[in-house]
Amino acid sequence: MGRVRLRGRKGSGTVAELGSGESASTSRFMATSDLMSELQKDSIQLDEDSERKVVKMLLRLLEDKNGEVQNLAVKCLGPLVGKVKEYQVETIVDALCANMRSDKEQLRDIAGIGLKTVLSELPTAATGSSLASNVCRKITGQLTSAIAQQEDVAVQLEALDILSDMLSRLGAPLGAFHASLLHCLLPQLSSPRLAVRKRAVGALGHLAAACSTDLFVELADHLLDRLPGPRAPASPAAIRTLIQCLGSIGRQAGHRLGAHLDRLVPLVEEFCNLDDDELRESCLQAFEAFLRKCPKEMAPHVPNVTSLCLQYIKHDPNYNYDSDEDEEQMETEDSEFSEQESEEEYSDDDDVSWKVRRAAAKCLAALIDSRPDLLPDFHCALAPALIHRFKEREENVKADVFGAYIVLLRQTRPPKGWMEVMEEPTQTGSNLQMLRGQVPLVMKALQRQLKDRSARARQGCFSLLTELAGVLPGSLAEHMPVLVAGIVFSLADRSSSSTIRMDALAFLQGLLGTEPAEAFQPHLPTLLPPVLACVADPFYKIAAEALLVLQELVRALWPLDGPRKLDPEPYVGEMSAATLARLRATDLDQEVKERAISCMGHLVGHLGDRLGDDLEPSLLLLLDRLRNEITRLSAVKALTLVAVSPLKISLQPILAEALPILASFLRKNQRALRLATLAALAALAQSQGPGLPPSAVRAVLAELPALVSESDMHVAQLAVDFLATVTRAQPASMAEVSGPVLAELLRLLRSPLLPAGVLMATEGFLQALVGTRPPCVDYAKLIGLLTAPVYEQAADGGPGLHKQVFHSLARCVAALAAACPQEAAGTANRLVGEARSPSSSPGVKVLAFLSLAEVGQVAGPGPQRELKAVLLEALGSPSEDVRAAASYALGRVGAGNLPDFLPFLLGQMEAEPRRQYLLLHSLREALGAAQPDSLKPYAEDIWALLFQRCEGAEEGTRGVVAECIGKLVLVNPPFLLPRFRKQLAAGRPHTRCTAITAAKYLISDQPHPIDPLLKTFIGEFMESLQDPDLNVRRATLAFFNSAVHNKPSLVRDLLDDILPFLYQETKIRRDLIREVEMGPFKHTVDDGLDVRKAAFECMYSLLESCLGQLDVCEFLNHVEDGLKDHYDIRMLTFIMLARLATLCPVPVLQRVDRLIEPLRATCTAKVKAGSVKQEFEKQDELKRSAMRAVAALLTIPEVGKSPIMADFSSQIRSNPELAALFESIQKDSVSAPSTDSMELS
């Protein structure tokens, strides 16, 4: 009988065949297979009649005598569920439930698999479909009765399995059944069958995560009441089950157990002491879950849990480690053999003590992970115990002991931006000091493990040592003999999988980066042969890793920036031979090809003078790889390495051919290739300049005008840098293309977005153009080209140039004047004339002043006498731009001639109060541009004058005064910084405010000599948070925020004292809220809002850079208050909440129910009808931000199971507006995963 396809009325042909009962089972199997492939197509559409027939047939096939047909029919159920109407799914489920109670075992099994298949295919509640919850409601009743009847254990087990599966995926929609499920599951905990108890434990864990608070309390109370006191009689199995159930609830819903832990933990501690290893394992697993999910509530119990873990991590009653240690001291030849013998002697199939040790190690890892604040205690108490257990005989346990120690190392790693140079010992410093003391113990414990027969043990050693080297770079140098022996042992191990050799190579590569090169030199004869053997390994991953190691070896042992301390002669031949062999082979994996090219580049760059006959073939091979599209990028980078090498390797054999190839790369779309090619060309022009063939250089230069464009500033910068280098090396070649290049460059200079790097490159290029002999382009012509846009603009009155463009052009004019000092005075005189001329347009004057600001320092004292009068006159100009440019110029020119200008400037400030703001700007520029030593004689006068200006009414003026004070303090910090104390103690509010703001300007994001001194004052500055004046407190918060963001190391150790005052500022203060009458309306004004906002901004910055020092629960209390505050603060706290959900989900999860309410209130708030457009926009933005926080919360797996969150989720789905908003946010987060994360400072 032929196979029938579904055609015409869908499904009819296949169904007819499925129904032919008499036909052979092969035919039924083929037809079912056809049905399966049809159902998997998206295009299939079943009408109602076909649906009915297909469902009916499939259900009949589930009872087929042929097992293979049954299996296929079950598989068909999955795709079918999504294709048929809801009532048909319910028909399928009813039939399967009935079969579950059949007396035929095979039928029950198939029904169980069928139900699981259907459940896994049901659309989740998140899609808005109610099908899943309807089906689950339908079968829950039948499952509970199947479980409760206890007639047949197999049915019971299957039902428990399905229930567990259902609760884990669809816990919340089953809310109505939770109570009945709980009452059905609890009795199963005392079932005589272990399998039933185990599955009931799993199902209760999932139920605990989704049920209401009342039910959860009922469940917890039930378990606590059932747990007898340790002396009360009870079967060990019953206790074990109850403790396992607690562990399961701890893992699935531990965040809800916090309130019950004080009753629970002492009981579990006592059970730990009963002589039952399985029970001990369950107790320790429960502790692990509690520590991870409720770290704060577990705090009082940490000492007891720690001592239990330390006791049981060495619990190994069947094995005597002392004999092991004696053996280690003997180190006899046959020690491996005897060890093997002794292990066999002690091995005991019933010994489960290893499970207890493993649970203790995992519990310790959870403890270290969840309590970073106790690190010093962990280093004292836990580290020695863990190191002592590295000798563990059971592989699984050893892996977890290593894992716990690695967690300790990760927690000890200094935070980003941590500075060891601070004088007084910090907590981080002392932790690292303790760790340094452990290094010899760790190495002694690992010495034997590094040569263990088990590859897994050695992998654990490499992971641990990699982490240690990362936390304490340089600490392993003195232990190099042991490490090298271990690495060589693993590299030579061909018995086990290739992974261990790759791990050994990766570890060696890491070591070369963290340990000093001298440590490796004596071991090179031992290390190099196995590495070179790995380079030749047939497995591509090993070869690629080994080439990387070889490259690092060359880079570390023969650095380019110092003398060679090791003679390369004995090694260079075999290294280049091994690399060349890989470079010549063409049938290699892409990764190996690229690494071989890079390795060859390093060899030629670092040791090219010793390669002898291998040098030319290597260069020719590089040229060959340049021509190949697959390897060209790697070849360009290798060529750059060779070109920048101080060995001045001659590239004559390949230059004539390589340059045109590189020129062609500049036309390619691949940006990485263009960037790498420009870097290579610049390196070649620098090192081989005059030797480059002129015709080839011209071919390259022809490609460059197109690259000098605003569309890609980075490429433009590299292109201009290269042009400058070529101009100096081959001015004749440059002269031909200078026209088109300059045209593009001038267009680029008119961009308001010009980055500083491109501007500096342009200055260098212009200087190169006039600096050659004879100049490629005449000085006067270049100045004319540069200033033309400003004069043209003045003439045609067209759209103005952007302010930034004037600064860029002025910098270029100054660069040209500096390159031609003989022309500088003439240029300065001409600029003074233009600035003075009444006919000059404001644009011309602005350019003249900005140029004078730069040129004035080059031109000498000649024009400066006239300059004062011109600049002072310009400060009264009607044009704001001219006034600002004159003020800037006055400061910059003054910085070059302080004895003349500073007294004049200070005198003007006294005489002209109206021009104060502009003159302060001039002073700020002078303080920034002058040499600190030249300012010292005037410091007292300037200090006095500035502090007189602190009480000015204008906030803008006070801001400039503060910046000036900040710059002045940097002139002589030890003398001036202590004076802030006096101003903060005695000054009036505006003075205190200005002093604190000035302190903010002392913090930069780069290391600075003032940092150690500043750190000693920060505590005093922060006392201003208790100042009665609001503005002073706000300025203090701005100062603190700057410190946290730019240099967290300044404040990390003071946070315990500062945070209570910071949190105090986040509170709404009723005494600062007042009502203002505006005509018939009353308007509420909150004077404390700005301070609160500043405090929340500080909290956000702390989250990014000082998370380890925060008590997150306390922090969350204030975030929670902020969720109900003013619009600006809510926006901030929504972002914080989203960050917290990612950074520390555990404490967020514990209070998720409280956090959801304010989010729900924001998302469902309505704007009053008739409000202005801005109100609607504000509300939309707020909703969007709140929804982002909701989406971030939902990334924590357990949050979706919370009943309140489930309720809110269904509310979102049922409201079209909220559903659309939620969907758009999820799309955004997929395309940009780190929307809310700011850069870590």
Image (spheres, grey):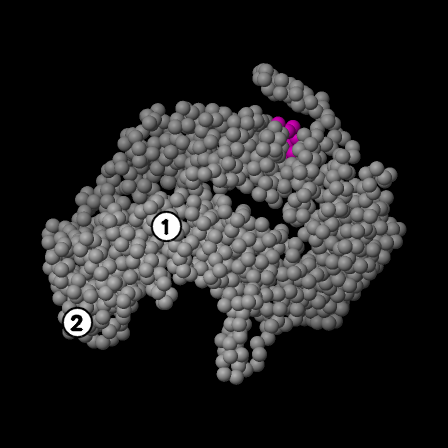
| Rendered view: 471 above or below 253 | above
Asked if residue 114 shows in the view, the reply is no
Q: Earlier in the sequence, mark 1 or mark 2?
A: 2
Q: Which residue occupies the foreground of this view, 1025 or 306?
A: 1025
Label 1 element class:
helix
| Rendered view: 704 above or below 639 | below
For discs 1 and 2, the disc positioned in front in the rendered view = 1
Residue at which label 2 appears: 840
In the displayed orientation, state which residue is furthest to the bottom: 1080
Q: Quadrant of residue 210?
A: bottom right
**Other residues around mark 2 within 10 Å, as few (<14) / some (14–19) / many (≥20):** some
Q: CA distance from mark 1 to mark 2?
A: 47 Å
Q: Quadrant of residue 1117?
A: bottom right
Q: Position of residue 604 (x, y in %)?
A: 31, 36
Three-letter amino acid code at disc 1?
A: Arg
**Other residues around mark 1 within 10 Å, as few (<14) / some (14–19) / many (≥20):** few
Residue depicted at x 63% and y 41% = 367
Q: Position of residue 309 (x, y in %)?
A: 68, 35
Where is the N terminus found, in terms of image quarters? Answer: bottom right
| Rendered view: 684 above or below 1196 | above
Three-letter amino acid code at disc 2?
A: Ser
Horizontally, residue 361 falls left or right of residue 26, namely: left
